[in-house]
Image: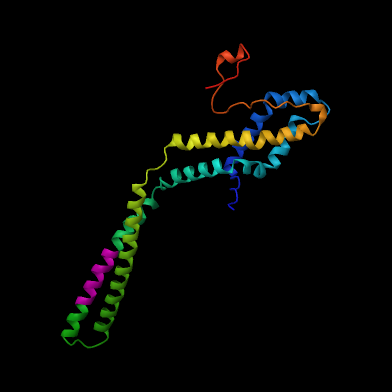
């Protein structure tokens, strides 16, 4: 069974906003007014914030989608400086190491052919073979980096409005399935509150002006 993702620190402000929106719902306000000696708005808010992770689990799937899109959008823009330096090093290292290896092996071979005395010919040849190995390994790393870059470019990054839509869907699910049911359960345990659940305020679609003049529910 997949565990719900824990609420990230940067998303706790959105959770608090959902709690405030729930506390402003008509049935919550009416229940609090009907029991002035009981729970207060501050009590309900503190309780919901203390149970943030548990309440956020009720909207785990929309939150997982939102985190995935947000992470993909952030990975698409690498930080400056290092982002351009590393690919350049990956390409230049094999070239420099290969060129140096060829030069050292050539000089060492010439000295050996000339029957030069001393350890210099052997040292040049050993250094040349070492650089040849470095060139081969760095070439494989550069190839893997190029393939990875090509694959990432083929993937279409999520647009900012997609990420924002996923955030709004998550906040609505958090309100409908996590925060509001919890607050209503707390108030229902006090008979004096006499809570009557109503449709929650929609965070995605504002209520049209005509709804303030009659009792017709807001709809798209």
Residue at coordinates 74% horizontally, 30% vertically from top-left? 41
* Magenta stretch contains residue 97: yes
The extreme right residue here reads 37
What is the quadrant of residue 9 in the picture?
A: top right
Residue 68 in the image, given as x and y percentages of width and height: 49, 45
- Give above or below for 78 relative to 88: above
Residue 220 image point, x, y percent: 52, 22
Q: Residue furthest top?
A: 213
Give the magenta range.
94-106
Which one is nearer the viewer's eye here, 110 or 151?
151
Q: Is residue 152 magenta?
A: no
Answer left or right for 73 relative to 26: left
Indicate the position of residue 190 as horizontal and vertical percent values.
81, 32
Residue 188, placed above or below residue 88: above
Which residue appears at 54% of the width and 45% of the height? Answer: 64
Q: Looking at the picture, does residue 169 appear above or below residue 136?
A: above
- Quarter of the view holding residue 87: bottom left
Instruction: Judge by depth and name the residue closer to the eye, 76 or 118.
Output: 76
């Amino acid at each position: 069974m997949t565990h719900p993702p824990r609420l990230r620190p940067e998303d706790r402000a959105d959770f608090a906003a959902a709690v405030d929106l729930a506390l402003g719902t008509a049935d919550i306000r009416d229940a609090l007014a009907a029991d002035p000696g009981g729970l207060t708005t501050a009590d309900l808010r503190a309780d919901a914030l203390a149970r943030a992770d548990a309440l956020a689990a009720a909207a785990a799937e929309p939150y997982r989608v939102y985190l995935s899109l947000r992470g993909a959008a952030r990975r698409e823009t690498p930080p400056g400086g290092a982002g351009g330096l590393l690919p350049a090093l990956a390409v230049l290292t094999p070239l420099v190491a290969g060129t140096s290896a060829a030069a050292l092996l050539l000089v060492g071979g010439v000295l050996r052919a000339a029957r030069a005395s001393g350890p210099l010919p052997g040292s040049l040849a050993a250094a040349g073979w070492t650089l040849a190995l470095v060139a081969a390994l760095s070439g494989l790393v550069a190839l893997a980096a190029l393939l990875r870059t090509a694959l990432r470019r083929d993937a279409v990054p999520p647009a900012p409005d997609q990420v924002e839509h996923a955030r709004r869907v998550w906040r609505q699910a958090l309100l409908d399935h996590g925060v509001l049911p919890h607050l209503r359960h707390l108030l229902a345990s006090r008979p004096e509150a006499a809570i009557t659940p109503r449709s929650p305020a929609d965070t995605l679609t504002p209520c049209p002006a005509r709804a303030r003049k009659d009792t017709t529910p807001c709809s798209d």
